[in-house]
Image (cartoon, rainbow, N blue to C red):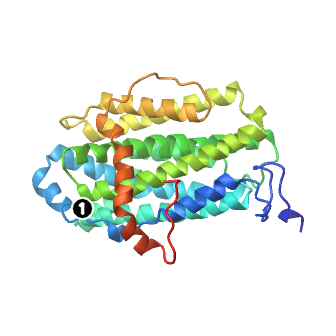
Amino acid sequence: MSHVHRPARLLDPGLCLTLRPMAYPAFFEMYRAAIKNTWTVEEVDFSTDVGDLRGRMSEAERHLVQRLVAFFATGDAIVANNLVLSLYRHINAPEARMYLSRQLYEEALHVQFYLTLLDTYVPDPDERHRAFAAIENIPSIRRKAEFCMRWLDAVQGMERLDEREQRRRFVLNLICFAACVEGLFFFGAFAYVYFLRSRGLLHGLAAGTNWVFRDESAHMRFAFEVVSTIRREEPELFDAALTSDVQAMIAEAIDCETQFAEDLVGGGVAGLSVRDIRQYLEFCADQRLATLGMPRRYGVKNPLPFMELQDVQEVANFFERRVSAYQVGVTGQVVLDAAF
């Protein structure tokens, strides 16, 4: 069976099934790390959130949360769709496909988390339906969805990556979903959650978002490792035209997310401005560009101090909650290793 043999390069067409010798051990280690990071929606306590929404938040803050949940309700489903239709098909290494199978489970878990959130926050069934229909009827969310779908459509119908142009389109799709969708749209959304947490609001949403934040950071790390592998194997793909296309894609994503910010905080949310959100997105964009080995473009500082605390708090929460999380997620012997 010829398809079993190791391809020379990660994007060579076929269905490689050979795990020994392992060609890309980094992907396998990412899979193992993800398994250790098992959590469930049932662990998240939303009990104080409903009281916050009813009694402690302004109309503008409630609008922010409603719009945010409407985006979350469909965002992860779009990412999962691209994972199955593009990434799993074309990244031809079994250890990478193991990671992607785990990522697909995590995307489903995130959808379940946001579904539970919606059911908890929005008791009225008609309002709930409108939240899921946001992708059609809320212009700022529709614009983000159209941006995603354009890059998804760019790889539709590609059965194999035989030609340079096909590989280039695949790389742009991969970068779009890692750097723009997960790396900007989702990180922008997390910023609103952590802003509310910094005001002592919606602790259930923030606790669940901690887990989602860690998952999404891992998804980005995987995708960027795939990009750097392709760069090593096929450096000719990474020319000035590709850098220019990535910069234009990121600039458009920032514009989409800024329009979303105008929708979310335009009614006046004390302590959070559209300008600060845009600068935070530019700060994140520079990090994504640097990780991709491309020049930074914006040269701005992080204007949201509560986001700088996030990584530190993440690690602390991780150690505090590991025992219960392992009891839910993993049976048998548990070994905490230095990766964390």
Total numbered labels: 1
Q: Is residue 176 left or right of residue 69?
A: right
In which image quadrant can residue 275 be found? Answer: top left
Q: Residue furthest right?
A: 2
Q: Position of residue 27 (x, y in %)?
A: 65, 55
Indicate the amino acid at tag 1. Answer: Tyr
- The answer to which of 147 and 200 lies nearer the viewer is 200
In which image quadrant can residue 280 be found? Answer: top left
Q: Is residue 94 left or right of residue 267?
A: right
Tag 1's secondary structure?
A: helix
Q: Residue furthest left?
A: 55
Q: Which residue is mark 1?
A: 121
* Residue depicted at x 53% and y 35%: 288
- Compared to residue 322, the image places residue 265 above or below, namely above
Q: Position of residue 87 (x, y in %)?
A: 65, 54
* Residue depicted at x 20% and y 51%: 201
Q: Position of residue 36 (x, y in %)?
A: 50, 64
Q: Residue furthest bottom?
A: 332
- The answer to which of 51 and 311 lies nearer the viewer is 311
- Compared to residue 271, the image places residue 19 above or below, namely below
* Residue depicted at x 18% and y 61%: 48
Tell me if I can see residue 275 in this picture.
yes
Q: Is residue 63 left or right of residue 335?
A: left
